[in-house]
Image (cartoon, rainbow, N blue to C red):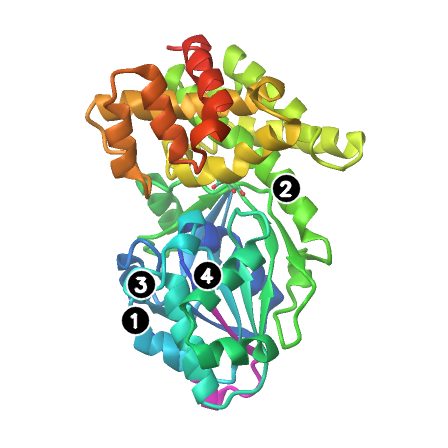
């Protein structure tokens, strides 16, 4: 562990931010904005890969950020992290959250992180609940803000619920007066990096970087303006503060992430491997347009604003140098489709009025079936249920079981099941 920031010696620092889930996205987005804001100590905890903490510590908590535009790369060293810990280091988390210097906790724990339950061994929100208890017991009165940076609508409310469920009674009672929970919309497409980026960072900066990040030039963060306590001056990094995050979230979830999921499954079925190939595939692109048309009609935003948004998206998807693998986006489909596709179908008034969103679900059921029958593991918190469903020989039963994993069952699911069974036959295959 590197402790480059001893809080007792650093009274001039404005506060400490603790980040949970230090994957690629946070290193391309949340931490970059925090570096640009300046003045804050930052401690990070890993998500799925505990080895990330060791890797960061071994390189003095610095890493290279490769911003990959359609024509060129810009390489920058991000040096905002002061301390990096493995996710399960609850002693460090308790100590940091109980310190009044800590005023903000940002989270990128992915969709499934919010339903991971109340056991600190497996749930980041449960560990956070335990650390808030330590803060209460330490008698800290200053407010702390919990800032969700995951692709869920109303992510602040979802986070509040998950933390409160895992908290003890006294901490629940203490919570309202001492904790702000902030919704945000985050956006920056961040593919998985490869050895080529390690070489590039070494060549451009001299840093021997085992954990570089590659990302697109575009970045956006819309943050609910509801902090009672201190926070980084993120506006210096172009962050937008607003009372109306939800509309931004819905726009991004249904247009960007919805199209992403559709391309991930339909694109792979059609023989594509990357997002730029999928958006360039005539039939997949037509499906994306259908999805966009219907998703747009669920968003109370002016047409010219939506036009500008979808053309910008198309350009981002077409970035040929980003090499964003569809298999990255295909992970955790049973979590993602619940928020990306099902609400569009419901709000449109049924599957017959939402063929694009139905295609996204059908592409998922068809793709997981093919993958599973081909002996591949599916990266999904419901992987076991998916494998069992995919093995059912009858299409109606198989799709019924898969759609149930999206939370739709019985009579309510019937119209979607029928539409999906029919749509699976029409999807382009390559
Ligand atoms: C993607 C997102 O993994 C996924 O499902 O849709 O990671 C997407 O790249 C980001 O939300 C872009 O901001």
Q: Is residue 354 visible?
A: yes
Q: Are marks 1 and 3 in contact (CB under 8 Å)?
A: no
Tell me if mark 3 has few (under 14), some (14-19) or many (20+) residues whose alpha carbon lies within 10 angstroms of its own. Answer: many
Mark 2 or mark 1, which is nearer the start of the sequence?
1
Q: Earlier in the sequence, mark 4 or mark 1?
A: 1
Q: Which mark is residue 250?
A: 2
- Nearest to N terminus: mark 3 or mark 2: 3
Q: Is residue 41 magenta?
A: no
Q: Residue at x 36, y 17 (%)?
A: 396
Q: Secondary structure at mark 4?
A: helix
Q: Position of residue 408 (x, y in %)?
A: 45, 34
Give the secondary structure at mark 2: helix
Q: Residues within 10 Å of mark 4 (few under 14, many from 20)?
A: many
Q: CA distance from mark 4 to mark 1?
A: 20 Å
Q: CA distance from mark 4 to mark 3?
A: 25 Å
Q: Place residue 20 in its image quadrant.
A: bottom left
The picture places residue 245, in percent across and down from the top left corner, at 67, 52
In the image, which is nearer the foreground, mark 4 or mark 1?
A: 4
Q: Which residue is mark 4?
A: 162
Tell me the distance, in whole angstroms, between the alpha carbons under discs 1 and 2: 34 Å
Instruction: Look at mark 3 in the image and give the residue it sits on.
Output: 53
Quadrant in which the C terminus appears: top left
Assess whether mark 2 and mark 1 are in contact (beta carbons under 8 angstroms): no
Task: From the viewer's side, name the closer residue of 182 and 314.
Answer: 182
Q: Please name the residue shown 43% across and 72% down the image.
A: 167
Kindly tell me whether mark 4's CB lies below 8 Å from ligand 1. no
Part of the protein shown in magenta: 5-19
């Amino acid at each position: 562990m590197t402790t480059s920031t001893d809080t007792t010696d650093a009274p001039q620092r404005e506060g400490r931010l603790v980040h949970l889930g230090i994957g690629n996205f946070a290193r391309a987005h949340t931490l970059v904005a925090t570096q640009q804001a300046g003045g804050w100590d930052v401690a990070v905890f890993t998500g799925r890969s505990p080895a990330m903490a060791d890797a960061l510590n071994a390189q003095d908590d610095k890493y290279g950020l490769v911003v990959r535009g359609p024509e060129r790369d810009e390489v920058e060293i991000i040096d905002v992290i002061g301390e990096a810990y493995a996710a399960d280091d609850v002693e460090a988390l308790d100590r940091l959250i109980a310190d009044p210097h800590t005023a903000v906790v940002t989270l990128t724990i992915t969709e499934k992180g919010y339903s991971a339950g109340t056991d600190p061994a497996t749930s980041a929100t449960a560990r956070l609940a335990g650390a808030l208890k330590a803060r209460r017991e330490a008698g800290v009165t200053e407010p702390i803000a919990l800032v969700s940076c995951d692709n869920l609508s109303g992510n602040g409310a979802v986070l509040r619920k998950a933390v409160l469920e895992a908290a003890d009674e006294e901490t629940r009672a203490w919570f309202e007066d001492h904790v702000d929970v902030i919704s945000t919309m985050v956006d920056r497409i961040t593919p998985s990096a490869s050895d080529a980026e390690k070489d590039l960072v070494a060549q451009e900066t001299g840093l021997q970087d085992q954990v570089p990040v590659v990302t697109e030039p575009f970045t956006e963060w819309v943050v609910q303006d509801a902090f009672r306590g201190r926070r980084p001056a993120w506006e210096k990094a172009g962050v937008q503060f607003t009372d109306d995050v939800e509309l931004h979230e819905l726009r991004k979830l249904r247009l960007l992430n919805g199209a992403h999921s559709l391309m991930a499954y339909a694109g792979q079925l059609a023989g594509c491997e990357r997002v730029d190939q999928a958006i360039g595939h005539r039939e997949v692109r037509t499906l994306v347009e259908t999805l966009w048309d219907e998703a747009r009609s669920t968003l109370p935003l002016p047409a010219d604003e939506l036009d500008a948004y979808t053309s910008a998206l198309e350009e981002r998807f077409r970035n040929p140098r980003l090499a964003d693998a569809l298999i990255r986006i295909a992970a955790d489909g049973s979590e993602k489709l619940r928020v990306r596709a099902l609400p569009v179908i419901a709000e449109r008034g049924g599957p017959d009025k939402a063929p694009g969103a139905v295609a996204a679900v059908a592409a998922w059921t068809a793709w997981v079936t093919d993958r599973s029958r081909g002996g591949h593991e599916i990266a999904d918190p419901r992987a076991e249920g998916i494998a069992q469903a995919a093995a059912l020989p009858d299409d109606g039963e198989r799709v019924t079981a898969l759609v149930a994993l999206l939370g739709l069952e019985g009579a309510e699911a019937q119209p979607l099941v029928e539409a999906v069974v029919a749509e699976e036959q029409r999807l382009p295959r390559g």
